[in-house]
Image (tube, helix red, strand yellow):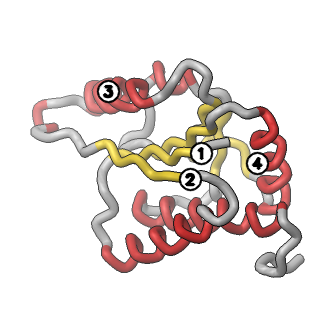
Amino acid sequence: MKSLLLLIGKTTNKHVSTCIDDYVGRIGHYMPFEIQVIPELKNTKNLSTSQQKEREGELLLNKIQEGDHVVLLDEHGQELRSVEFAKWLEKRQQSGRRLVFVIGGAYGFSEAVYHRANEQFSLSKMTFSHQLVRLVFTEQVYRACTIIKGEPYHHE
């Protein structure tokens, strides 16, 4: 099963980017995983928040295929412990469907993207920058892979 992380805008902090790349490399030892970056919209000063979400939503939906299982990383989503996420991921891997995780732009997702999503997860009740969400999420995917394989990275 292939997994994809869709992002709006590139990771601008080079230290965070280096860490993300490290985890993506580690994840690759367990499963196919890639990140696709959708460039941030330009000239957004004349766009309302709603218009910006709609345009970003169109770009996101263009990258999602019909059979994909889509999971939004959203502050209102379900919170899972790492072990629960690992069990969820293992079950999803058996489905054979491509798994697409999505981190939206600064204002969240359009209604069309929410409608397309199969699930929503929240990483925390706290608010993180979009840069850090990327890092925390890739670390959690790596952690889940090691839990599934019974490796000693995760301690409980």
In the rendered structure, which disc, 1 or 2, sits on the residue that comes first in sequence? 1
> Marks 1 and 3: which is nearer the front?
1
Res. 96 image quadrant: top right
Q: Nearer the viewer, mark 3 or mark 2?
A: 2
Indicate which disc, 4 or 3, sits on the residue closer to the N terminus.
3
Packing grade of label 1 (10 A; few <14, some 14-19, many >=20) is some
Question: Which comes before the other along the chain, label 4 or label 1?
Answer: 1
Cα distance, mark 1 to mark 3? 29 Å
Report how far apart the C-alphas of labels 2 and 4 lie in the structure: 13 Å
Q: Is residue 128 visible?
A: yes
Mark 2 or mark 4, earlier in chain: 2
Residue where numbered disc 4 is placed = 89
What residue is shown at x 37% (from left), y 41% (from top)?
A: 107
Residue that label 1 marks: 3
Considering the numbered disc 2 on the image, is that residue within a helix, a strand or a loop?
A: strand
Residue at 79%, 59% (x, y): give it: 81
Q: Residue at x 43, y 42 (%)?
A: 104
Tag shown at residue 17: none
Residue 79 is left or right of residue 49, and the answer is right
Disc 4 marks a residue whose amino acid type is Leu
Label 4 packing within 10 angstroms: few (<14), some (14-19), many (20+): some
Mark toward the start of the polypeptide (3 vs 2) = 2
- Image coords of residue 137 (percent x, y): 58, 60
Q: Earlier in the sequence, mark 1 or mark 3?
A: 1
